[in-house]
Amino acid sequence: MPSAKTTSLLPLEVSSLSYRVDQETLLDNIDLSVDSPGISVIMGANGAGKSLLLRIVHGLLEAHSGAIYWHGVAMAETLRRRQALVFQKPVLMRRSVAANIDFVLRPMGGQYRQRRDELLHQAGLQHKRNQPARLLSGGEQQKLALARALATEPEVLLLDEPCASIDSASTLQIENLLHDTRQRGVKIILVTHDIGQARRLADDVIFMHRGRILEHRPAASFFDSPSSPEGQAYLDGRIVV
Amino acid sequence: MQDFSEAFGLAASLILGFDADLGEIIVLSLRVSLSAVLLAALIGFPLGALTAVLSFPGRQAIAVLMNALMGLPPVVVGLLVYMALSRAGPLGWMNLLYTPMAMIIAQTILVTPIIAALSRQVMEDMHREYDEQFRSLCIPTRRVMTALIWDSRYSLLTVALAGFGRAIAEVGAVIIVGGNIDHLTRVMTTAIALETSKGNLALALALGFVLLILALSVNAAVYSLRASAKRLSYA
Amino acid sequence: MKTRPETILLIAALALSGTNPAGSAETSIIVQSTTSTANSGLYDYLLPTFKMDTGITVNVVAVGTGQAIKNAKNCDGDVLLVHAKSAEEKFVAEGFGLSRQDLMYNDLIFVGPPSDAAAIGGGRSAIEALSKIAASQAKFASRGDNSGTHKKEMALWQEAGLDPGQQSGRWYLETGSGMGATLNAAVGSGAYTMADRATWISFSNKQDFKILVEGDDMLFNQYGIIAINPNRCAQVKREAAQKFVDWMLSAKGQAAIASYQLEGQQLFFPNAN
């Protein structure tokens, strides 16, 4: 395994970021700085703005105001090339499992078949390589989406609730893959509202509530004693409006 | 009408007896219309993909234009191609008038808008699904287009089939640019028109049945291909 | 995706579309022709012999005389074979054709339903028949397509001092199509019409229609043959075209025309001089 190295894309600096849809403010003047390696978990209830924030820092959506800098460079496509995003609902192409990976690998040149088999092996999908991707189970589809994201050799891996609706065996495999990926020095930003998963994976926690970031602290300290009543309520499993 | 039963009988005997002249006409019909559809697909699929993927001003206007051109009357296309290919026309030196190639050109023009417009609709839907993922992966436009064409290949087969249906059934364009010359440019539809004008209504109808069977077999072949693709979730 | 889909399509398209232009080889010519000679089977009867004699393939584009002349003016043919003498002479006078020769003749006839509402049956005079039809306002189907037969019909109306154009769409029906389509329309709607005898004899959808008027000198129907002028149309196959014209006018060609029969009747009468 290659030695851990810190990505040169960090720190991620978000300042005064706002996003509105028809008069409704979905992200409200967000400031965020992520400079530690490892896994940052964005937590919060549904509608807190987690997925939206993830898409905006990846450059898929444009904020109405505010700025995003990765290592001091304003967000642009050249930066997006060094990142990968795994969506909550995997978007797989109408091809075989292997061809879905090849689609990403082939333009990178080289011996892509070997690399693809490696990736499929890591994702536990090598025996399904010739099957149509869209006939895989939900868990398998998400593993394939993750393998494809890793095929791009991202420096930052963004995941939007990757395990929201999949079986626990697949969840375990995905978490293991994320662990390995973290070990290799890839920065991971994971959106989840699965508290258990956050506890298992997080190095630091960004807690969002109704379009704002209420807390950003090391995981241990957040889970131990959240500073905001909303964070406390969330961890207690109470519904906060 | 006694013509109907007579036509059925004639159609059966034409097919079972395998008339050499009829065979020639069938082969030419298929050659002309399939070539036209292939050429139209070559132009129409990328055009459909381009208008599905790119958002540029006037894109809507192009979509409306393509839809309108779907209703282009074959006679008008035939006339335009005749004027271009006539020895007195700008492309007369190519000596293409009254050849199968002229018929292929006319039918290609006729079919391209259909294939472009319908494939745009197919690929627009797929693009909506793929778009975020592709943008996340920073896939360049050209590659997005080829990926959409490839991934919608089974739906596009159906699109091509719609074009084939129009090509194989039209008479207005091929009769003008082909001239309905025996053993050279006579196809099913022009043969039907000829027999009708000779008053051989039963024979004309019988040829119509043969044409129908032809169209049915092509359709059946494509649909069975598509059905198996659907089972594999590629469609 | 080993081979790109475009490549497959391209190869398939090229494979399917092999060209064999009608006009490229010196051994084939295009005849722009009136429909009656083609629909009656005359060419099918003559051309194999001509091909045997000369090795030349004749590709016939059978359209109305009006369109045939128009196509020939666009140089889209090597020989013109139609039946509208004055239009043909004008064609030559304007320099499109080398010279016009009488080739053969037959005659035009009036056909109609057995009920014969205008009571023209058994008559000989074309003028009288038209006058009766107009007077009784019985349906009459006209080619309306500027063909030889249509031109003849218009001349006859004029001779009769009548202008049926004003009645167009009432009892006077202009089909704007070929002889066969017009016959189909006449038979379908119980209308009178005027046709050349060759097309009528070879027409299969007569139902109960009959010849009602024939034998008038004014119904004489002359066919002419013209080689297209190579000075006007550079791509004309001069030699092959001339060979065809010469053969049709030769004793052998004329005899062949005379010997063509359908249902026991001679359809065309050679009269080259």
Image: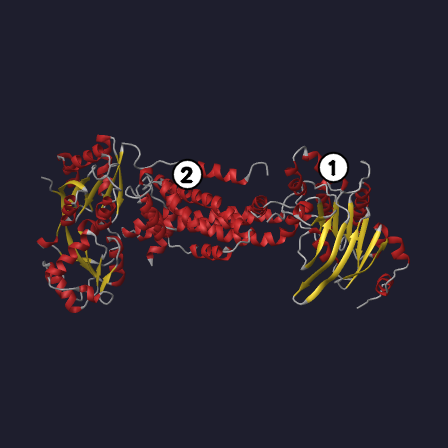
Closer to the camera in the image, A14 or B91: A14
Under circle 2, the secondary element is loop
- The x and y percentages for residue A98 are 67, 40
Expressed as whole percent of the image width and height from the top left, the position of residue C175 reads 26, 59
Give the side of residue B39 with respect to residue B78, left or right: right
Discs 2/1, front? 1
Question: Residue at left 20%, top 64%?
Answer: C165
Same subunit: marks 2 and 1: no
Please, which chain is the residue tagged with disc 1 on? Answer: A
The residue under label 1 is which amino acid type?
Glu
The answer to whether any part of residue A183 appears in the image is: yes
Mark 2: few, some, or many residues within 10 Å (few <14, many ≥20)?
Answer: many
Residue A234's mark? none
Q: Which of C2 and C234 is in front in this view?
A: C234
Q: Which mark is residue C17?
A: 2
Tell me where residue B69 sits by quadrant: bottom left
Name the residue furthest front: A72
SS at badge 1: helix
Q: Which amino acid does label 2 sit on?
A: Ser
Question: What colouring style does the render use?
Answer: secondary structure
Question: Label 1: which residue?
Answer: A118
The answer to whether A142 appears left or right of C208 in the picture is right
Q: Distance between the residues labelled 2 and 1?
A: 46 Å
The C terminus of chain A, quarter of image: bottom right
- Residue C34 visible? The answer is no
Q: Which residue is drawn at 40% across and 51% down?
A: B169
Q: Which residue is drawn at 55% across and 50% down?
A: B155
Expressed as whole percent of the image width and height from the top left, the position of residue C136 reads 16, 69
Q: Are marks 2 and 1 in contact (CB under 8 Å)?
A: no
Using the image, name the chain to which the residue with label 2 belongs: C
Asked if residue C192 lies left or right of residue A117, the reply is: left
